[in-house]
Amino acid sequence: MPFTPSSIRHFFESQIETWPLAKENYSALAQVQTRELHLNGFDRPICIQHNPARIRSTAAKVDAAALSERPCFLCATNRPEVQVSLPIADSFEMLVNPYPILHEHYTIVSTQHQPQTLKGCWEAMNSVIDQLGDDYMVFYNGPHCGASAPDHLHIQAGRWTEVPLIKYILTNREKFAKGSSWQENSCAPLGYTICVEDRTNSNYYSQFEDNDDVNVVLVHDLAIFIPRRKHRPDCFFATDDKRRLISPGALDMCGMIIAPNKDDFENLGAEEALSILRECGKWQQPTIHVGIVKGKQIDSTQHKDFFTLRNVTIGVNFHWQQLEDQHFKGKLRIVPEGNEKWAVNDILLEDYLTSVVSSEMNAHAPLEFLKAHAIVSRSWLIAQLERKRMPRQITSKTEENATSDNATIIRYYDRDDHTLFDVCADDHCQRYQGMSRITEAASTAVRDTRGKVLMFDGKVVDARFSKCCGGKSELYETCWDDNPHPEFSSVADCPEDASVDFCDTHDDALLSTILNSYDVSTHDFYSWKVNYSAEEISRLVKEKSGIDVGTVTTLTPLRRGASGRICLLRIEGTRRTITVGKELEIRRLLSPTHLYSSWFYPSYAEGFFTLEGRGWGHGVGMCQIGAAVMASRGFNCAQILAHYYPNARLECIYD
């Protein structure tokens, strides 16, 4: 016989009065502390709840050995006599949860001891939500997705008004009202895949009949699926001060994070909290918005399956700058900015990557190198998208301090320069030059690595790369913000026998295979020399910095990074002295375009400065030429990535 919400509420109140443990814990819940965490891109705060009583569930051992050693606390024979049940669906009975998260919290258990599966309780979930009514939700934790009793089939229920994501979905349900397949109804307001469907006609349910890596919430006439790729985040297993006793179930994944430990409750910030949820959730392939070219007029032609942009500048301000006509998949949007316009390409991430891999390097390069590059480029891009979800941080910096005699100029540049789109199409971000250079090998490399990224400490690695490291890679903080980035190491770009560096190659046949045509002309990428007269270098410094130092007399490196790249340089002149950083600003000031790198040693003799240098680019992360040489010598994708990112590991974050 169906029950009414009022009869179920009466059952709840009766249990609270007659069961001391439940009465005590629900009274404590009324006093529990909560804190709001505000995220970019989500129009309501998520919350963190300090709930010490949940330590049993959060820290529960759920391996087979532990389950076999303890009596099942959901079986009728093992429950306390005071805990009574209410039959509510075929072969299921309702219990008041004695360790609540919600102020009215139920556990609905199978009358038979059987493993937790969505298939086993789907009908019961629908029956229960029909009986509970619109004020309630029913939710399911997969056996490896938050269930503290994965050996006994059960679901849970409570009022949805306390749960941020459920409130968001019900408020914005028009976003999910259309679409014939689950992909069309999926969204990612918190950055991981969430599918919303009509629960009476669910297409997505069949995806999990035999795969229980999912959390499910039924509310009103909706079924909300949250696919999972992890049960618990890495920080759960940490043994140092990075440990967080957070074990996300359905409510956590819906923006209601449970923290039994006081320290976690007080110190968990928005960025770390979202990182934990994202580490455990599964992502969907996003659409990328790429700014390609800017001008008063955009010369474009729309074709059936692609569009053409004419006179696109590539290598902006670098020594290989040139114009190209380019063809692109995806959608073209014209976005105004002041008196000019941007041509913005909206394209799926994997299609974007196929072009990036073919643009950054020659798409005829060895397949294992192309696969490694696809993973690195995917990681870099997703890390940039992740930043947009966090409270904004300054990643493009200008610091200028001046007196009458000296000035300090510290500048570094990063993707936050872009506000109208996600990334640009040139070397400032990643080269993205359309369809013309794509080969079957490049398509295979992206397809074979689909969804794979580099991870460190639960986050996608902001995986940088440069053309040639010069024999040793650089640390992140040498080139960008000063915060330590332990995901990066400075590594020697050579085999174990410490013979010739991988990137120190003079094999013209190999170089023509791995470099694009406009890069092949650069022969001295590993070691190079530049000569300037004092007049020439003085003019460059004045033009590029806007400061007249007079005649330059001395160049003094004040600070170098781990590879030898200069990140702070003093330039003394006859009129004044300036101190310049970081590496790209140094390269910019001392060249009509850019120096190949800031790893150089300056000298002065007879009115001329000589800069003897190594490498091409900032040197952080993967050395593209070195990695391509490794692949040509038989190293596979995983070995290449382990060489350049020894602190990271590979994970697949979407299918």
Image (cartoon, rainbow, N blue to C red):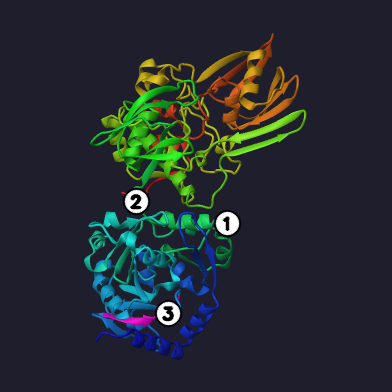
In front here: 118 or 350? 350
* Marked residue nearer the N-terminal end (3 or 1): 3
* Marked residue nearer the N-terminal end (2 or 1): 1
User: What SS does tag 3 mark?
Assistant: loop
Q: Amino acid at mark 2?
A: Gln
- The local crowd at label 2, few if under 14, some if 14 to 19, many if 20 or more residues have their Cα within 10 Å, is many
User: Mark 2 against mark 1, which lies toward the viewer?
Assistant: 2
Taking the view exactly as shown, the residue that stands out farthest to the right is 404
Q: In 3D space, how far apart are the residues under numbered discs 2 and 1 (Cα atoms)?
A: 32 Å
- The local crowd at label 1, few if under 14, some if 14 to 19, many if 20 or more residues have their Cα within 10 Å, is few
The answer to which image quadrant residue 602 occupies is: top right
Residue 547 in sight from this viewpoint: yes
Residue 32 x %, y %: 54, 75
Picture residue at 58% right of the left edge, 61% below the top: 267
Q: Amino acid at mark 1?
A: Asp
In this picture, which residue range is highlighted in magenta? 92-100
In front here: 566 or 68? 566
User: What SS does tag 1 mark?
Assistant: loop
Instruction: Left or right? Give the position of 353 relative to 33.
Output: left
Residue 569 x %, y %: 66, 27
Picture residue at 30% right of the left edge, 66% below the top: 223
- Residue 647 vs 357, above or below: the answer is below
User: What SS does tag 2 mark?
Assistant: loop
Residue 43 x %, y %: 46, 60
Q: In 3D space, how far apart are the residues under numbered discs 3 and 1 (Cα atoms)?
A: 34 Å
Which residue lies under the disc numbered 1?
241
Taking the view exactly as shown, the residue that stands out farthest to the front is 339
Residue 39 x %, y %: 50, 57
Which residue lies under the disc numbered 3?
104
Which residue lies under the disc numbered 2?
284
- Which label sits on residue 111? none
Residue 146 in sight from this viewpoint: no
